[in-house]
Amino acid sequence: MDNGWALFSAATNGRLDVTKYLISQGSVVDRGMDDGWTALHIAAKNGHINVIEYLISQGADVNRGMDDGFTSLHNAAKNGHLDVTEYLISRGAEVDRETNDGCTALHSAASKGLDVTKYLISQGAEVNKRDNKGWTPLHISAKNGHLDVTEYLISEGAEVNRGMDDGLTALHSASKNGHLDVTKYLISRGAEVNKGDNNGSTALHIAAKNGHLDVTKYLISQEAEVDRGTNEGCTALHSAASKGLDVTEYLISQGAEVNKGDHKGLDITKYLISKGAEVNKEDNRGLTALHSAAQQGYLDVTEYLISQGAEVTKKDKAGKTPLHHAVQNGYLEVVKALLEGGARFDIGDIHRQTPLQLSVIRGYQSIADLFIDHLNSKNGHLDVTEYLISEGAEVNRGMDDGLTALHSASKNGHLDVTKYLISRGAEVNKGDNNGSTALHIAAKNGHLDVTKYLISQEAEVDRGTNEGCTALHSAASKGLDVTEYLISQGAEVNKGDHKGLDITKYLISKGAEVNKEDNRGLTALHSAAQQGYLDVTEYLISQGAEVTKKDKAGKTPLHHAVQNGYLEVVKALLEGGARFDIGDIHRQTPLQLSVIRGYQSIADLFIDHLNSKLDDTDFPYIYLATQHGHTSTIEKLVAKGANLNVRSTDGQTCLHEAIKLCYESRKIVQETDKLRKISDVYYKGELSTERALVFYLLDNGAKLDVQDETGNLPIQYAKDEVVKQMIFSRNASPDINLEDHGVSLDIPPEVDHQNDSYKITITPLRDPPSVDIQDDESMACFGIRCDPPAMIFHQPVKIRIPHSSLVGNPDLVTPHIVSRAWDSVKDLPVTSRKISSNSPDEPPYCRVYKRHLELYIGHCAEWWVLLPFEQRVIRHQLMCTPYIPDSIQREQRFEIHLQMHADLPGMEKNIEEEKKQQSYRKNHRSVPFSVESKSGDVTVTCHREGVQVESTVINICKH
């Protein structure tokens, strides 16, 4: 877990010691977690005042909101933490700050308790503040039954009768939840008992609806109107009917009119009738209880009402009988009960529509059949048809899908009805919305007699639908008799779209061309694959069907099989030679299609057919799998060796796409065992599948330094710290290392607030600038130039540089720092010399260690570090290395070159190259040799860039 989560956990549990430690180690105080929660938010929620005080002292933003707009003050108030509330306000928390829903801290406090409510109001919180739905703190306290809070809010000016956007007042809220004490108090302070909401519902309606008898009694005692109706005419008695007898009995005992419609439960119905309710009483829409019961499908209530004398043919104001309402909603059993009770299906409403017509229009076949059976006629459907036409029914009128009565008769094989309709002017070749005629439908359903009659009435045998399908194609799915007859009548056998195996064999035996195309370029194999007909597919392939033939959209039969997920058909096509790398007109291959559609088994089948390791040309598959979150396919392709780092046309890799998926509003990434394990092992099960996929790609070689066409690295699409830390923790942080010189540059996250990419370079410098170096100080190491010039960092950048100075106590060293930058205005270099600051957060700052130093800078420039002698610093440490000739004979005397040099990175390597040219090499420490010493002077010379700059004579005594 990264430090962000650790800090959040410490704040959650009130661990001040851990909180302090984590912040001292660099944890960001205001780092946001999921949903925007920070350490301060969770500490405020849990009431950890000591942690809160420390977080704010470290710069935590008191007014920072979460994703839903809740601040720390909202959290403290909502959970009743008075001390936290007081402290947050003392540190600048905005009292009336609103959430995304318009709620203030006072709204939150009103749901919890009195103390915080009082304090917020004392600090200026607006008592009548409305949220986005019009809720005030008073509504909330009343809803939750907090009498003390309600009393205090009203004493501070809360408006008792103020309504929400839907018109509900505090009294409505209290009544709905059965809070009698709050209800009494609100009325005592002027709450209007009979005030209605936008629907006209009063507190009494709501109390009765929710079965609160005590509140109901009290409201009536306060002159609530018992028979007050809503906008739809519903009274409190109607509302009570859905809850129980106690409220209902009480309302009736108080004079509620029992003759006001809208009845539901059987017990209530019986009770109301036993109390004198009129069975046929109408509401303001003309509806009786029987209308309502039929409309809702309440069979028991319907039967009881009929037994009590309810009029089954009574019309409402729209002219509809109870039977209309039952048919309208398809309640077959209720229709039966009404018919048994004397209902008639030939009564029209104000639009002259009968229940019978309605059943036909609605397509309720069982209800229509029930009506037909009641006609008691010899020919059944024919009599109904004759009856409807005699009543003015339009013969060629189509339904919403264009089907006419002739289509329906042909579909069901009613030859007599078909003949009658044609005799009354039905158009034989009229097509529905899809272009299907009665002949198509009769042939499709295998009705040979109807097919013959339609052809005798000049039905066009080769008439095509909108998709080019003829009656012969339709007949193919039912049987040979209709097919043979159509062919005998001249139907063309080469018009594609074949289904049943027997028909397919029959047509081919009659000379049908296997690869014949229709007007969309589809062959029989395309159609079989599209429909998933395995037997037909295999037979067509055996008869020479071209498995790679393209239709006009460029799709092969394999495209169509994959499109619909027919695995077995896909296998058959592959065995027949189909290729999954052929693209359609959009260059989409079957393999790509399987990935996009998420057909894992088909994608696996294709991947298994890959005989070798995937190369860069196979990139689209794993890229598409990543785009669509198909983790199983990704894992399979990775196992095959797919390259995660090949770039798409816009320069992006799989990692770019995976990071962007983390911020999609809909979650599309498939969870697999591997992703679940990543979440469980590394994030305690709290990592989303999208972020786990990013983790998986990183673990499998996804590179972090690939820029897309806009110059963005994958990390630049990361919007949260979890994903960023995944990247930084994989040793892929933006560090620059100069291995030959031992220098590293550590660039922290968000060092530059811009989204633009940038390139930072560092260069070691041997020559110091023209700076006045005092006799009591020396250069600590070589200099560093950081480019681009004039670039300013929003956070300090750390440079680690080795040095060769002997430092007695590094903690006592305060270096001087020299920088040289170019002044673009004066077009001159500007040199600056400063003493190191006391903190890395205030650059320039330098910390000296035994063998290296760390320099913190705030901008690009040339940088040099000077060390004063008096701070226990000796000049440079010198290295003395013996070099011997490459070739040495036993007992031979030779010269040893003792090479002394400053212990600086890179220098020893240069000396080795120089000695190599002199045929000398560095002696290995494991090879001993003896040196004969003689008295005399040793001259030590210092060279810089090949030029002697200093010479010193050292006197050595004889040993």
Image (spheres, rainbow, N blue to C red):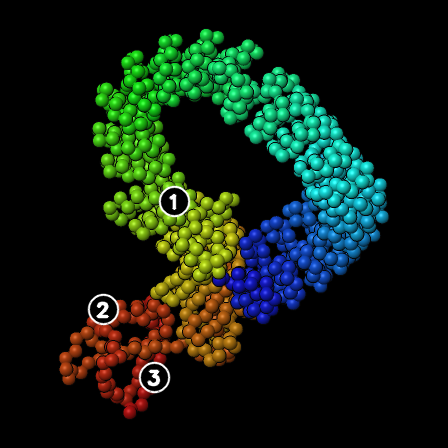
For the residues carrying marks 1 and 3, which lies nearer the camera in this image?
A: 1
Under mark 1, the amino acid is: Ala
Left or right: where 887 falls relative to 948? left
Left/right of residue 759 with respect to residue 495 in the rendered view:
right
Q: Amino acid at mark 2?
A: Gln
**Disc 3 or disc 2, which is closer to the eye?**
2
Q: What is the number of the mark on residue 625? A: 1
| Residue 132 visible in the current orientation | yes
Q: Quadrant of residue 81?
A: bottom right
Q: In front: 388, or 180?
A: 388
The residue at which mark 3 appears reads as 954
The vertical placement of 32 against 955, above or below, is above
Inspect the image, locate mark 3, and give the three-letter code of the amino acid beneath it: Ile
130 up-or-down from 520: above or below: below
Label 1 and label 3: CA atoms lie apart by: 75 Å
- Up/down of 151 relative to 87, above or below: above
Residue at image location 71% in from the left, 25% down from the top? 286
* N-term-proximal mark, 1 vs 3: 1
Q: Residue at x 22, y 73 (%)?
A: 920
Looking at the image, is mark 3 or mark 2 earlier in the sequence?
2
Count neighbours of disc 2 (C-alpha within 10 A) and say few if under 14, some if 14 to 19, many if 20 or more: few
Of circles 2 and 1, which is in front?
Answer: 1
Task: Describe the element under mark 3 as helix, strand or loop.
Answer: strand
Q: Which residue is mark 2?
A: 917
User: In the rendered structure, are the residues bearing label 1 and label 3 in contact, judged by CB atoms less than 8 Å apart?
Assistant: no
Q: Residue at x 39, y 18 (%)?
A: 442
Task: State the image coordinates of residue 15 (x, y, percent, origin top left).
Answer: 59, 68
